[in-house]
Image (tube, helix red, strand yellow):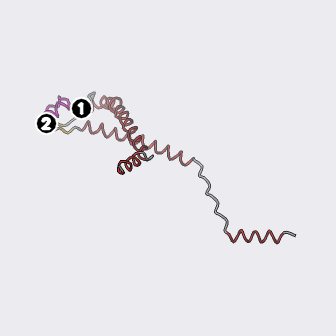
Amino acid sequence: MSMLKEFKSFAIKGNVVDLAIGIIIGAAFGKIVESLVQDVIMPLVGRVVGGLDFSNYFIPLNGQSMALTLVEAKKAGAVLAYGSFLTIVINFVILAFIIFQMVRLVNRARRNEPVPAPAPEPTKEEVVLLREIRDSLRQP
């Protein structure tokens, strides 16, 4: 039972919960970026490059026909799927850039927060005694 309590206290700590939320949001955001790349950017790149679906670009390694789609060519043997690889690289670059911008905004917001003033140091006992002596000598 002790191990269960220990696990529960670990699992509900703020950092663990924050990490879990970050992972879930990151996965959802990754899907958005993936859709942006595959559904918006890569069709435009494919149009410029030759009008084909860019993710279907491959180099056959087993004598497959270039007329096949990537899925069909993979069924027939090994292929070098450079179109898929480039799509994933573009996904990564866009995602990394967006995360960089988010971190940059958070850092800028942190710099603008006022820094709390440090608490004054307690007065030393000798100074307090000297002030009391001074004040008693000033009295008529």
Q: Which mark is residue 56?
A: 1
The quadrant where residue 72 appears? top left
Q: Nearer the viewer, residue 48 or 62?
A: 62
Callout 2 crowding tier (Cα within 10 Å): few <14, some 14–19, many ≥20? few
Residue 11 falls within the magenta-colored stretch: no
- The amino acid on which the numbered mark 1 sits, given as a three-letter code, is Asn
Q: Nearer the viewer, residue 41 or 49?
A: 41
Callout 1 crowding tier (Cα within 10 Å): few <14, some 14–19, many ≥20? some
- Residue shown at 42%/45% (left/top)? 12
Work out whether 96 lies above or below 74: below
Work out whether 48 lies above or below 19: above
Where residue 34 sits in the image (x, y, percent)?
34, 34
The quadrant where residue 121 appears? bottom right
- The amino acid on which the numbered mark 2 sits, given as a three-letter code, is Gly
Where residue 17 sits in the image (x, y, percent)?
42, 43
Q: CA distance from mark 1 to mark 2?
A: 15 Å
Which stretch appears magenta?
63-75
- For disc 2, the marked residue is 77
Label total for image: 2
First reached walking from the N terminus: tag 1 or tag 2: 1
Where residue 25 sits in the image (x, y, percent)?
40, 37
- Residue shown at 39%/39% (left/top)? 26
Quadrant occupied by the C terminus: bottom right
Work out whether 63 lies above or below 139: above
Where residue 130 sits in the image (x, y, percent)?
74, 71
Q: Residue furthest right?
A: 140
- Residue shown at 61%/57% (left/top)? 118
